[in-house]
């Protein structure tokens, strides 16, 4: 009789997974393969040919008689170009010329943008293919020299100054296809950072190295042109060069560092809550097993989501940041929290309870799977943080398509992030009181923490005013429950001794007051629960304007290019901030870094653009793909000439001082150009 | 609360979450899809199906308006001196222009190149139809609106006397192709 009410987790789980897959699979089918374009500062073809969207069937769709234009390879794909600094006084230029197309030797033009310290040396050209009896631009018939397949040029540089410097290389080239049409001349402008020439090293200059036989195209050399790489590009490069063991150790360590950021914090009460929720019969081994499952599920989810993001440019985490999912998940935590307060104690018949204990094996496997699901969802929903290591791995996967190395790195990163969780989870099992009043106290504490997690989640989708009220209410109620206003100590007698009760009362009072401050803060328009009364302070101080910076919102790629052009005309540098409401680090950046008066003062010189990618819509996806953004927070810098300073990209949170140093680098760069 | 009921509880909540998701998907799918197609799937820019209006300088420095060729079989040919295939087809055009001028066939070349080079080539090869200078942003828009997305050359469009486009394509256009395309437009009695 009772058996029919018995809980068999497996069918539920199967159903749950089935439903989840039903949702996930259509999403995955919609994914569009991502083409990460080579890193470039500005690509200005002498004519802009991007006017028409890349719809290959456009012509065919409009006229039924179009035998020619159906499958024209875009010029960027016909001639894949990259430039690298081979030595302090040598550049290597490489063209991968698509089959069926060629480049004219005489159309190549190389020059350097405004610089006096560096000049181009003579170039030794590899032997070209000679096409005879061809009509020449002059109208005469003659021979013409062509390059096919690959072309590698070694360009010697003559340097007057030994100090590290940046040069702007302008390369022009033009070619045609065998099928009888030509591409317009292409002009590329590339910023290259030349390292300093050390005193000891002899310059390779005198012997102008001729181009050796073309090497196998290194897909990853695209990332190399800029010498001081940004942190994430540096890590991406490391993935190509490092050995597997080194990669694992590095990313494990980086993950460990990430574990101490606000991105991972919410996971601590979640995992501890699960373990505490197991009840008094939890053993350290069980706790460890649960923690391990949680961490493994989290790391695996990071890996899978990362590989998907890298290969398809779809940010799965961003896809999960819809108000519905966040709201539902917050509800889960509220429910879990209330369970911690024993509001859900379901009084099962004793007979059933014994049955349950007998079935403990099945039950255990069930809770393991439940924990795993919780771990996976935590990774996707609770902490969608993009930090340099994550971005690095994603860039690497996007550029090389090598999901294995990237995946290994991501998994190591996830495990690194999970190590502190493992320790905390296991010790939660270790030190958990076996039973009695203390057990209830611990459970209550975790209940409050889980409510906190729920509010953190809600912060992403609700106005600050409401979440401030929630924080205040939570703290005030907790304070009261801790006995803030107990006059008669006997009523606090759930505690073992009088001393504990007093301590609890005192702490409760503190929480109450803090909660009250937050409530007041909400009333005066503060949106930071850590500094609830800030607005009051600021209205008194005079330099309020200093710390107030305003961003121009950007919604589409067209708007973005427009804003960039405007800034270029005004000769102002540009800062582009990729932001999302659900992004914890973005808020940190905004509240801690951008709001600092020193930073705000400097930022006033910039044109400040903000791309809010909270909504994971088509425009935002397009923007992120076109600008090669992995996710928020990412900050891009453009100099006065509208050139992106790719190596200065910031991914993730950056504290004030570091940010100031970073900006200083940018400014010295701007002067140099 | 017993562990198992806690677990069941989590499960129920998740089931709720997933169902909410599905409902959400169903409810908002149509709206979501429409925004998807608006910008992620590129919308074709409105392309011309008839002779567009444009004014360009010719190699003699005179402004030429496109409407002067209305009523003729117009072949617009975009070319440049850096484009080998373009240069190869021009002699054929010259011949055909000579042959079918009386039938109302009019070639017009638009050169996307430096003026001096264009002028030199045109005089050297004795081009017998107007050559306009396309070194102009107007021409880039024109190319795009005519359906040439990369600015690949040569690019030729044949307009019927009523201005309707009867052929367009990137790549060499032979005299034979032109003859078949315009055959119906030429009175055979002559």
Image (cartoon, coloured by chain):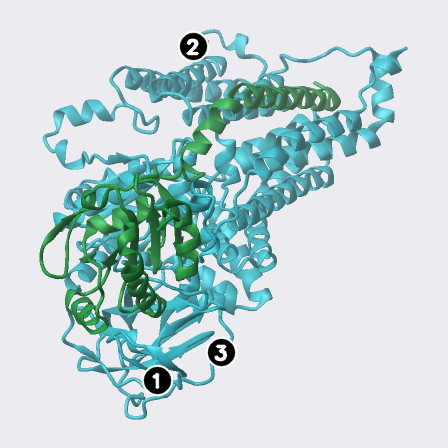
Q: Earlier in the sequence, mark 3 or mark 1?
A: 1
User: Marks 2 and 3: same chain?
Assistant: yes
The colour applied to the residues of chain B in this rendering is green
* Callout 2: SS: loop
Reply above or below: A644 against A323.
Answer: below
Q: Position of residue A613 (x, y in %)?
A: 39, 35
Q: Position of residue A576 (x, y in %)?
A: 28, 44
Q: Position of residue A635 (x, y in %)?
A: 32, 47
The numbered mark at residue A485 is 2
Residue that badge 1 annotates: A125
Measured in 3D between alpha carbons, the distance from the residue under mark 1 to the one under mark 2, in whole angstroms, is: 87 Å
Image side of residue B14 versus residue A356, left or right? left
Chain bearing tag 3 is A
Q: Residue at x 21, y 76 (%)?
A: A163
The colour applied to the residues of chain A in this rendering is cyan
Reply above or below: A423 against A509.
Answer: below
Reply above or below: B124 against A663.
Answer: below
User: Marks 1 and 2: same chain?
Assistant: yes
């Amino acid at each position: 009789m009772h058996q029919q009410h018995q809980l068999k987790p497996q069918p539920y789980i199967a159903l749950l997974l089935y439903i989840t897959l039903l949702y996930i699979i259509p999403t995955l089918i919609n994914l569009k393969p991502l083409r990460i374009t080579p890193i470039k500062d500005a690509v200005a073809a002498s004519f802009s040919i991007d006017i028409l969207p890349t719809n290959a069937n456009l012509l065919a769709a409009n006229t039924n008689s179009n035998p020619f234009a159906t499958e024209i390879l875009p010029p960027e794909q016909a001639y894949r170009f990259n430039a690298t600094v081979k030595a302090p006084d040598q550049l290597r230029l490489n063209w991968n010329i698509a089959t069926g197309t060629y480049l004219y030797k005489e159309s190549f033009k190389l020059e350097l943008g405004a610089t006096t310290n560096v000049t181009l040396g003579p170039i030794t050209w590899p032997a070209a293919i000679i096409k005879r009896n061809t009509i020449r631009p002059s109208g005469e018939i003659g021979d013409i020299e062509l390059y096919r397949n690959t072309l590698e040029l070694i360009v010697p540089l003559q340097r007057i100054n030994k100090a590290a410097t940046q040069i702007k290389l302008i390369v022009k080239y033009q070619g045609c296809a065998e099928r009888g049409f030509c591409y317009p001349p292409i002009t590329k402008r590339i910023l290259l950072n030349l390292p300093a020439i050390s005193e000891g090293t002899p310059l390779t200059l005198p012997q102008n190295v001729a181009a050796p036989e073309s090497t196998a195209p290194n897909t990853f050399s695209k990332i190399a042109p800029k010498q001081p790489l940004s942190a994430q590009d540096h890590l991406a490069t490391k993935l190509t060069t490092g050995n597997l063991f080194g990669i694992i150790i590095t990313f494990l360590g980086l993950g460990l560092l990430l574990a101490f950021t606000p991105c991972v914090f919410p996971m601590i009460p979640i995992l501890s809550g699960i373990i505490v929720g197991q009840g008094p019969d939890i053993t350290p081994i069980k706790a460890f097993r649960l923690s391990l499952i949680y961490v493994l599920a989290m790391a695996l989810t990071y890996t899978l989501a990362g590989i998907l993001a890298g290969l398809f440019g779809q940010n799965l985490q961003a896809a999960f940041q819809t108000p519905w999912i966040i709201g539902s998940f917050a509800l889960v935590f509220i429910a879990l929290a209330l369970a911690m307060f024993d509001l859900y104690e379901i009084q099962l018949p004793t007979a059933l309870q014994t049955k349950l204990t007998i079935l403990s094996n099945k039950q255990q496997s069930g809770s393991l799977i439940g924990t795993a699901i919780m771990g996976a969802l935590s990774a996707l929903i609770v902490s969608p943080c993009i930090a340099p290591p994550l971005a690095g791995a994603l860039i690497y996967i996007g550029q090389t398509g090598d999901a294995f190395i990237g995946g290994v790195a991501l998994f190591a990163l996830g495990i690194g992030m999970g190590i502190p969780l493992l320790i905390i989870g296991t010790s939660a099992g270790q030190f958990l009181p076996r039973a009695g009043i203390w057990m209830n106290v611990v459970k209550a504490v975790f209940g409050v923490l889980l409510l906190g997690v729920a509010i953190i989640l809600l912060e992403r989708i609700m106005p600050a005013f409401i979440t401030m009220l929630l924080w205040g209410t939570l703290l005030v109620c907790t304070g009261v429950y801790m006995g803030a206003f107990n006059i008669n100590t006997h009523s606090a007698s759930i505690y073992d001794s009088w001393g504990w009760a007093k301590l609890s009362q005192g702490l409760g009072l503190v929480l109450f007051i803090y909660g009250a401050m937050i409530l007041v803060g909400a009333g005066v328009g503060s949106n930071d629960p850590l500094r609830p009364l800030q607005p009051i302070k600021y209205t008194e101080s005079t330099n309020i304007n200093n710390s107030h910076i305003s961003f121009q919102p950007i919604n589409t790629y067209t708007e973005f290019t427009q804003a960039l052009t405007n800034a270029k005309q005004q000769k102002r540098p540009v800062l582009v901030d990729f932001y999302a409401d659900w992004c914890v680090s973005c808020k940190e950046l905004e509240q801690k870094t951008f709001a600092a008066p020193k930073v705000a003062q400097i930022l006033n010189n910039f044109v400040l653009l903000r791309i809010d990618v909270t909504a994971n819509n088509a425009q935002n996806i397009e923007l992120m793909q076109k600008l090669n953004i992995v996710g928020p927070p990412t900050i891009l810098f453009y100099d006065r000439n509208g050139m992106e300073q790719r190596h200065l990209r910031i991914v993730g949170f950056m504290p004030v001082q570091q940010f100031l140093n970073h900006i200083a680098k940018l400014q010295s760069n701007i002067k140099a150009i | 609360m017993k562990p198992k009921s806690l677990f069941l509880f989590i499960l129920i909540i998740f089931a709720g979450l997933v169902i909410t998701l599905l409902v959400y998907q169903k409810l908002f799918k149509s709206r979501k899809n429409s925004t998807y197609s608006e910008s992620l799937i590129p919308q074709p820019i409105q392309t011309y199906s008839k002779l567009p209006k444009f004014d360009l300088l010719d190699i003699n420095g005179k402004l030429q308006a496109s409407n002067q060729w209305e009523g003729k079989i117009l072949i617009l040919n975009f070319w440049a001196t850096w484009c080998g295939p373009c240069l190869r087809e021009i002699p054929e055009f010259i011949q055909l222009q000579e042959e079918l001028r009386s039938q109302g066939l009019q070639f017009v070349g638009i050169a996307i190149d430096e003026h001096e080079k264009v002028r030199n080539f045109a005089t050297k090869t004795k081009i017998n139809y107007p050559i306009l200078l396309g070194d102009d942003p107007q021409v880039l828009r024109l190319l795009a609106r005519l359906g040439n997305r990369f600015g690949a050359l040569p690019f030729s469009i044949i307009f019927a006397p009523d201005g309707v486009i009867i052929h367009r394509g990137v790549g060499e256009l032979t005299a034979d192709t032109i003859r078949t395309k315009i055959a119906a437009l030429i009175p055979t009695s002559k």
